[in-house]
Amino acid sequence: MPEETEVGHGWDPDQYAKFAAERAKPFFDLLAMVHPVPGGDVIDLGCGTGELTAQLHAQTRAGATVGMDASEAMLAKARPRADDGLRFELGDIGRFATEAGFDVVFANASLQWVPDHPRLLRQLAAGLRPGGQLAVQVPANADHPSHAVAIEVAREAPFRDHLGADPAPGIHPVCAPERYAEILDKLGFSQQHVRLQVYGHHLDSSAAVLEWTKGTTLLRFKSLLPPEVFDLFVERYRLRLAEVLGWQAPYFYTFKRILFWARRPGP
């Protein structure tokens, strides 16, 4: 694993933005679960390029919102958006630790990069004031060929020689929806809403799935493999994915995600 618990290096904002509209829908569904906190303090863990963090700041009516990300490339796009109580800073979600100081801890499509979610959620809950809200969205699509084929390829030579016995350490930290409900209850949240939702995306063709995963899922392997080996990995993944999906144009890409919201007891 890289030194960071998140994949902070290797992010390409332009690659990620190829499917910005598709990636934004879960964000707004999650944001709809959050109650406004006029004048309050909000943190967005894994803020990316900041467009959506600005929406979070405006719709919660926060007095101060900090967008945190492990990628300097993403933050370079985000920092010009800082204004009127909104700021951005470099940080590692896995090392997030603060005394209760936030009214909302928000994490959209970021916690999947961090292992041990029971421990992580305990840390995030500790950052909330009484009455504070935790809002999280994580992908739950590990069984789709877009993700499963990457694991299959990682177990092949020469990639397994570089990745070791576990070809994808920490690649499946996401829990089942009911497990998140149990964790939130054990942490003492007085209210919660947990759901599994399927998003359908109309892509130009099945070949576009590679462009999607190059912006996210494959980054974990990019961080672990030498550049020339990673190039071989991507080509093998492309061929194997074509075998599994066949040629479809257009292609309906189904993507499962878990969304949950919880509130601590208090005012």
Image: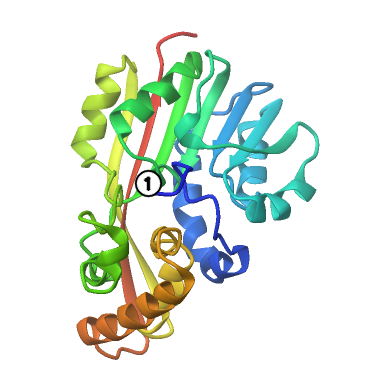
Q: Amino acid at mark 1?
A: Gln
Q: Secondary structure at mark 1?
A: helix
The residue singled out by tag 1 in the image is: 112
Residue 91, x across and y down, in percent:
59, 37
**How many residues crowd around disc 1 within 10 Å: few (fewer than 14), some, or many (20 or more)?**
many
Q: Is residue 180 left or right of residue 13?
A: left
Residue 127, x across and y down, in percent:
50, 19
Viewer-proximal residue among 57 and 207: 207
Residue 111, x across and y down, in percent:
41, 42
**Residue at the farthest front position:** 161
Viewer-proximal residue among 230 and 111: 230
Does residue 130 sit above or below 216 in this rendering? above
Give the residue displayed 33% in from the left and 72% down from the top: 253
Q: Is residue 44 left or right of residue 123?
A: right
Give the residue displayed 40% in from the left and 11% down from the top: 265
The colour scheme used to paint the residues is: rainbow
Give the residue displayed 24% in from the left and 71% down from the top: 149
